[in-house]
Amino acid sequence: MTVAVRVRRAFGTHWYAWTMVAPVVLVIGVIIGYPLARGVFLSLTDANEANVERNIGVNHIPATYKFTGLDNYKAVLSDGVFWDRLGWTVVWTVACVGLTFLLGLTLATMLNRKLRGRTFYRLALILPWAIPAFISVFTWRMLYNEKSGILNKLLAGGGIDAVPWLNDPTWAKLSVVAVNVWLGVPFMLVALLGGLTSIPAELYEAAEMDGANAWQRFRNITVPGLRAVSSTVILLSTIWTFNMFPVIFLLTRGGPGDATEILVTYAYRLSFVDSPRNFSESAAWGVLILLMLSVVAVVYRRALRKQGEVW
């Protein structure tokens, strides 16, 4: 059976579903498809702010950039800046996702039990998720202020010298990780709590009757029961954290120096901050980020399929 026949048969059988989905596909194609195709095209040129199409007053200046093939990719991959940023981005992603998952799992396990005020605790822990990210980041920036921040005032009250939270490379890295974990825990908590509630209580009761302790019940019932949910939230959290532009840019702008700059913030810097603005190289960075995340998703999915997980 040819592909055309399969498509025709599928459309004929499920024409109503295809009709309902078509507007969404069209909107996504316009919003995401065109910018993506445009970015890939620009990455194969030498486009910058001096040779792109632009209007100055009533004068229209046509584009003069040229097709350069894979030159931008060769330049990026041979530049130590890319590998330095990639190294920190990987560390940043692993640290944030790991801590977020562990904290989310711990809190979800605690809140899955019957305890007094459980609803209040659930709402309180979800609160960071309800606040816009930029407001949360600006609040943390005030807390981290070396001279007037609350954190250093608390330390001063205990006779401890002020900590340069955002002015020292090591402290700045720890600070941005802490903020991102604080923002990410509510999502992980909600997802894992939903997974915990779907595990039959009879399994725990049977295991307890058989003499299994709390750790054995967690290892043999909770962990396998959360495997499907965990695999999904870990992948989503990895993708979001790898591209977490707001936390880095609004909190440190990649500083001090370039200590906290990840791949996506450096791509932004090339296109909108540095002069002359290099649109083609910035687009090449963006395409490389997309390719790396696509490879991670494919490898992760195949690993899960080998373990019996299908999604």
Image (spheres, grey):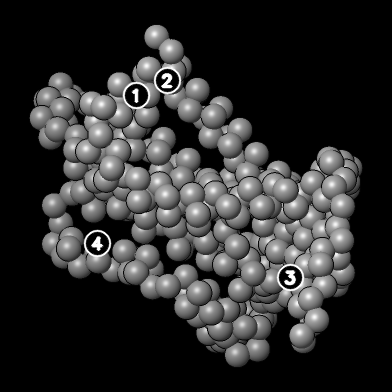
How far apart marks 1 and 4 lie (CA) works out to 49 Å
**First along the sequence among labels 1 and 4:** 1
Can the viewer see residue 104 in this picture? no
Of badges 3 and 1, the one in the foreground is 1
- In the image shown, does 257 or 149 lie closer to the viewer? 257
Q: Which residue is mark 4?
A: 122
What's the residue type where badge 1 is placed?
Arg
How far apart marks 2 and 3 lie (CA) works out to 45 Å
Residue 262 left/right relative to 240: right
Q: Which residue is mark 1?
A: 8
x, y percentage for residue 222?
28, 33
How far apart marks 4 and 3 lie (CA) works out to 40 Å
x, y percentage for residue 221?
26, 28
The secondary structure type at the circle numbered 2 is helix
Is disc 1 in contact with disc 2, using a CB cutoff of under 8 Å? yes
The residue located at (72%, 48%) in the rendering is: 41
Of badges 4 and 3, the one in the foreground is 3
Q: Which residue is mark 3?
A: 272
Location of residue 172 by image quarter: bottom right
Q: Which residue is mark 2?
A: 4
The residue located at (85%, 47%) in the rendering is: 67
**First along the sequence among labels 2 and 3:** 2
**First along the sequence among labels 3 and 1:** 1
Residue 35: assigned label = none
x, y percentage for residue 105?
36, 46
What's the residue type where badge 3 is placed?
Phe
What's the residue type where badge 4 is placed?
Arg
**First along the sequence among labels 4 and 3:** 4
The secondary structure type at the circle numbered 3 is helix
Q: Quadrant of the C terminus?
A: top left
